[in-house]
């Protein structure tokens, strides 16, 4: 799952990088540091996060080995990941590698600078100075602009993301997907679609005592079918992508295997054929017991009729 | 025309079988009356007042487990919760929210109270002894684990979902971390309508 997030992460960076190009860039040897920002902190919160992009245009890898700031007792390099509905945080004791020719993005939901022991609250509109130390390129000072408590990017980036800070994608815990979570980009990123659909279904249907498995997910254009199982129950969901993310149209059993049924429901014929073929292929190697669960879904439950 | 007849058939199927499926789903989610979300614990709120499991009775609730040293998930969820309250306005006035600390050794009532006051006056910070916090966490299936940091301090891994409870204090669903704002508000409206 973490690997999927990383893939989404990499995709998001391709999309948002150009928006950063004008402003807030700092050059240090072969490294370009851009879009530095932080988030306002809540009363008494003793920690804060720092986010930025580091591009390595050189031919050798470099490494962010440490960071410090007069605004905090210590600054550590951390990685956060959502595993199911659990947030996990890890300190990267060895620092963070910046591979040659690549850009590493420190963003909400993933890698970040963690400011520990804040001297005072981070206030929206102010800046936080931080000194970054790289193994090869050396040391550089960067100013993080403090955005809102739940901001996803430096201020100038908001238009490019087509999001405001309160409008989140429907991927549940897909915080890393934010930059990529627009329609055109998603079409080109089937791995992101699978992650988004899995996250959304788990977000809605999973409970602590009833874990939900989502497999397989097949996508054609803005339509998708996802197999799911929860305990002894299971079925298939027909989904459609909307401006705000994937949503479930209806749940059924074996009926969704048939292209004719899909077309009759309103899925365009080409997508219906592609989905049925992809589903047959994806399910061919699944455990028959799992397929039996999918088949056990009796009848059809309409979730959002207007969707298709 | 074909589409319409299929839809009618589907709705027929919903009428005949949907109820069964929904009932089954509810039964699967709530295996037993004294199971998920049902526990006994003694905690204190942000004002130092003793509270227990009955705090969730009498109004719908949104319940989150976090800690004030939390760099991202908790402030983000608090910011989203603030926007839920703002969006619901008077429609949501029955709703009460709770922030239960899974780091009670650092989160005193006063620290918690100031922290959650940023969100709304309808969210209450809850802390207590580690033993009693463990009881409420177990009740709600909360995973939380200390993770040591190089400087000798620690951070916490923890379940990041918001739990929704009806006016009887019974579990009704969750809002996932960073759930779409419209979906989250729709879930809260459903909860308010049911309660």
Image: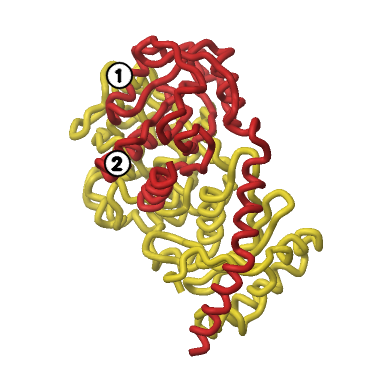
Residue positioned 48% across, 28% down in the render:
B65
- On residue B83, which mark appears? 2
Q: Are marks 2 and 1 in contact (CB under 8 Å)?
A: no
| Chain B shade | red
B165 w.r.t. A284: above or below: above
Residue at disc 2, secondary structure: helix
Image coordinates of residue A172 in percent, x first then y, are 47, 48
* x and y percentages locating residue A210 in the rendered image: 65, 43
Residue identifier under label 1 = B114
Count every numbered label the image shows and give the total: 2
The disc numbered 2 marks a residue on which chain?
Answer: B
Q: Residues within 10 Å of mark 1 (few under 14, many from 20)?
A: some
Image colour for chain A is yellow
Q: Is residue A286 left or right of residue A78?
A: right
Output the chain of dot 1.
Answer: B
Measure how far apart labels 2 and 1 are at the Cα level.
Answer: 18 Å
Q: Is residue A139 visible?
A: yes
Name above or below for residue B179 compared with residue B145. Answer: below
């Amino acid at each position: 799952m973490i690997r999927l997030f990383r893939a989404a992460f990499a995709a998001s960076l391709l999309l948002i990088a150009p928006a950063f190009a004008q402003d807030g860039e700092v050059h240090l040897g072969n490294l370009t540091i851009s879009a530095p920002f932080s988030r306002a902190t809540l009363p008494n919160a003793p920690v804060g996060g720092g986010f930025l992009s580091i591009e390595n245009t050189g031919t050798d890898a470099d490494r962010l080995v440490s960071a410090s700031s007069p605004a905090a007792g210590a600054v550590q390099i951390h990685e956060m990941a959502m595993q199911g509905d659990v947030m996990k945080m890890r300190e990267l004791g060895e620092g963070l590698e910046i591979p040659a020719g690549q850009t590493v993005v420190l963003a909400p939901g993933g890698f970040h600078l963690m400011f520990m022991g804040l001297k005072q609250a981070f206030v929206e509109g102010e800046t936080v100075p931080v000194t970054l130390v790289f193994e090869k390129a050396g040391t550089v000072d960067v100013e993080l602009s403090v955005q809102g408590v739940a901001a996803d990017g430096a201020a100038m980036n908001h238009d490019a993301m087509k999001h405001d800070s309160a409008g989140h994608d429907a991927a549940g815990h897909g915080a890393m997907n934010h930059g990529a979570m627009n329609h055109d980009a998603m079409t080109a990123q089937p791995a992101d679609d699978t992650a988004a659909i899995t996250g959304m279904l788990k977000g809605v249907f999973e409970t602590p005592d009833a874990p939900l498995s989502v497999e397989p997910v097949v996508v054609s254009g803005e339509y998708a079918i996802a197999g799911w199982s929860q305990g002894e129950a299971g079925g298939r969901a027909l989904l459609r992508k909307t401006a705000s993310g994937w949503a479930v149209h209806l749940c059924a059993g074996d009926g969704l295997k048939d292209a004719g049924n899909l077309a009759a429901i309103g899925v365009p014929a080409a997508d219906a054929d592609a989905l049925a073929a992809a589903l047959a292929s994806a399910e061919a190697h699944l455990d028959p017991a799992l397929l039996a669960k999918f088949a056990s879904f009796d009848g059809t439950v309409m979730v959002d009729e207007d969707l298709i | 025309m074909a589409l319409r007849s299929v839809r009618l058939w589907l709705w027929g199927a919903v009428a005949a079988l949907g109820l069964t499926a929904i009932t089954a789903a509810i039964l699967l989610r709530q295996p037993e009356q004294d199971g998920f979300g049902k526990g006994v614990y003694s905690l204190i709120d942000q004002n130092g007042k003793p509270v227990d499991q009955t705090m969730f009775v009498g109004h719908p609730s949104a319940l989150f487990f976090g800690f004030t040293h939390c760099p991202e998930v908790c402030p983000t969820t608090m910011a989203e919760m603030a926007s839920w309250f703002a969006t619901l306005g008077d429609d949501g006035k029955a709703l009460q929210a709770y922030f239960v600390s899974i780091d009670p050794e650092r989160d005193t009532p006063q620290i918690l109270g100031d922290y959650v006051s940023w969100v709304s006056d309808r969210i209450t910070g809850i802390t207590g002894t580690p033993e009693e916090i463990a009881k409420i966490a177990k009740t709600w299936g909360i995973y939380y684990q200390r993770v040591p940091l190089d400087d000798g301090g620690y951070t916490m891994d923890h379940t990041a979902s918001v739990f929704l409870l009806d006016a009887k204090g019974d579990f009704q669903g969750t809002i996932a971390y960073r759930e779409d704002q419209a979906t989250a508000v729709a879930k809260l409206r459903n909860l308010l309508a049911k309660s």
